Image: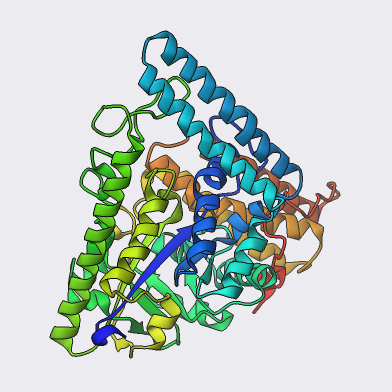
Amino acid sequence: MSGDRGTLSLVLHSHMPYVEGFGTWPFGEEWLWEAVGCVYMPLLELIEETAAPLTLGVTPVLCDQLETLPGPAGERLLGYLRDTRQWVHDEDATGLERAGELKLAAEVRRAAGDYARAADAVEACRGDLLGRLAKAAAAGPLELWTSAATHAVLPLLATEAGLDLQIATAVAGHRRRFGGWDGGLWLPECAYAPGLEQGLAPHGTSAFCVDQTAALGHGSAEQLEPIATAAGPVAVPIDWQTVELVWREGSGYPADSRYRDYHHGTVHHMRPWSNSGEVYSPDAARTAVREHARDFVERAVERLDRYSADRGRPGVLCCAFDTELLGHWWYEGVEWLRSVLDEAEAQGLELATVGDAVRRVEPVARELTASTWGTGKDLTTWDSPRVAEFTFAARSAELRTVAAATNGSPSGPALERAARELLAIQASDWPFQVTRDLAAGYPAERVRDHVAALDAALGALTDSAAVPEPSLRNLAPDLALSALAAP
């Protein structure tokens, strides 16, 4: 390590609830198409070009959807990128031109090129994004992590069998798609409860991230120390002081006046303004990107140097973001990441994947406390009176499905379908969207429909009802159904 300073580990957590085939505008699969065009394709190109030691989490449920792109779903994606997005950009640009706003119109037309380039990239690889990602991981220092099958908040699961179903299904899918797994597992919403690692270890988990800000203190030296657990996996604290340089509403880098304003748009939600209210200038934004990348690396170096000077050992500075922040919420985010990689080399800051970093330092022994990276660092976002309908529905569905598997046949198409409907119900996204006033009635509708389908599938186990199809689009094709019947 450079001067025994330690390393910076950049973690990107990529996730999308299963929306492919479940509605379109304003809620539904267009979320996925936007993410592919604005986030995943640009990021994949950066990964291939830089061969940087990044830690990239890709949730199984996102992979389930990306796996469908070489087929009809990919045709709908290309239609969205080439037709829908081009049409709405042209429509709004024409309207701005009629109003005499020629500079705004020109920016809208420029931004349309983002979608055209994404469509070209998707066509060039025939929609095989997962294949490209697997090749990038095999060729370079990229480290791929998995997560729970459908991003369930693990401390809220009702049974050990339910936990096993989420993790075993996830690991099986990851191994099939990427040819192996090194044991890195992203806890959905960073949600941890003491003892959770005991359920993760038997599946091969070697490391996971935690947010221990409330327990260890914001900006404390302890945030740079991986934590050994008795069960085996290493818990790696996320340093929120570093994360907040980006992810802090109103004062993080994306709030700079030169960046594109996400919150104000034209009729069809084109965004030709900067945060200053002026016409967006890509050149001015590029200058800001370089400044903020330099500042980020300087602060990371300072944080690591201070730790190594005080403790006499190297630290692990772990900085994690939702991948979708880069390119979607923060238009310039992928280019900022590219500049961070350049700046790290220029300033002598060593980057390492989480796996490499924890292998090069001795984890400390320390108690872990219950936590998430959500508001309040607790479970309120996913477990409160406001979302009680979702919490109770998920727990009831889990208990009934586990009981059916334990008391009756532990296999068969009806139980497979019930298990997949259960996984869909357990997604953390539905209560999150309600808590944050997102997506109107879409999450409640999704949960009600999945509960009804689960009831029908369980009913087919005990009466003469028609046996349903075991599949649920491409959700959980590597379903580990045996986990439900395990003792």
| Residue 213 relative to residue 99: left or right | left
Quadrant of image for the N terminus: bottom left
Confirm whether residue 370 shows in the render: no
Q: Observer-nearest residue: 94 or 469?
A: 94
Left or right of 411 in this view: 165: left
Write the residue at 26% across / 77% down.
Answer: 224
| Residue at (22, 63) in percent of width and height | 241
State the image coordinates of residue 363 (x, y, percent, origin top left): 33, 87
Nearer the observer, 354 or 160:
354
Instruction: Name the image colouring.
Output: rainbow
Q: In the rendering, at what x and y percent does residue 359 appear? A: 41, 87
Q: Residue at x 42, y 15 (%)?
A: 96
Task: Using the rendered view, name the quadrant where residue 228 is placed.
Answer: bottom left
Q: Position of residue 31 (x, y in %)?
A: 54, 40
- Residue at the spot x=81%, y=50% of the render? 469
Residue 419: name its quadrant.
bottom right
How far across and how far down the image is residue 423, in percent? 61, 57
Total tally of numbered discs in the picture: 0
Q: In the displayed structure, would residue 271 be above or below residue 139? A: above
- Left or right? Give the position of 393 relative to 277: right
User: Is 147 rendered above or below residue 221?
Assistant: above
Let me know if residue 403 appears in the view: yes
Split into 4 quadrants, where in the image is the C terminus? bottom right
